[in-house]
Amino acid sequence: QQPNFFWKSAMSRYSEATQALEAAFLAVIPTPKKNKAPGKAEWAQALEQFNTQARAVRAQYRLGLIGRAVVAYRLQPRLLAAGCSPDVVRQILFSMVLHAFVG
């Protein structure tokens, strides 16, 4: 019974981490203003804020290698469902993995 308990605990932790990252991303994503798309500077600042929060989530939930992979895999469809374009999601996840989840 113990392995099942630890498995459920880890999966719950991964779900919480995924929710935290989704909320963090949706809080910092730049939104278009009156027919004007967000500029590169706005996106760069939003990515930096998101990566900082992703590093904090990684530490808070003590995500190991498998945990980071599970969370990144689960985050992708959540961001797509939230209305982000596939290109934006790809760039966000690549940036998160490279800057916050490696190491």
Image (spheres, rainbow, N blue to C red):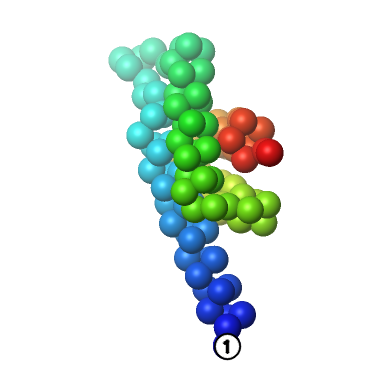
Which image quadrant is residue 96 in?
top right
Q: Position of residue 55 (x, y in %)?
A: 52, 38
The N terminus sits in image quarter: bottom right
Can you give x and y, in whole percent of width and height, for residue 97 in the image? Answer: 64, 38
Q: Is residue 77 visible?
A: no
Identity of the residue furthest to the left in this view: 34
- Image quadrant containing the C terminus: top right
Residue at label 1? 1
Residue 25 pos. (x, y %): 43, 36
Residue 56 makes an appearance in the image? yes
Which corner quadrant of the image does residue 90 belong to? Answer: top right
Neighbour class for label 1 at 10 Å: few (<14), some, many (≥20)?
few
Image position of 65 with respect to 54: above or below: below
| Element on which disc 1 rests | loop
Count of residue discs: 1
Q: Is residue 64 above or below residue 96?
A: below
The residue drawn where x is 44% and y is 16% is 42
Image spot of residue 39 (x, y percent): 46, 12
Residue at image point 49% right, 53% down = 61
As drawn, is 85 to the left or to the right of 20? right
Q: Nearer the viewer, residue 69 or 2?
A: 2
User: Residue placed at 48% from the left, 45% from the top?
Assistant: 57
Decide: is 96 above or below 9: above
Residue, far bottom = 1
Circle 1: residue type:
Gln
- Residue in view at x 47 percent, y 65 percent: 12
For this view, does 103 lie left or right of residue 71? Answer: right
Q: Is residue 33 left or right of residue 96?
A: left
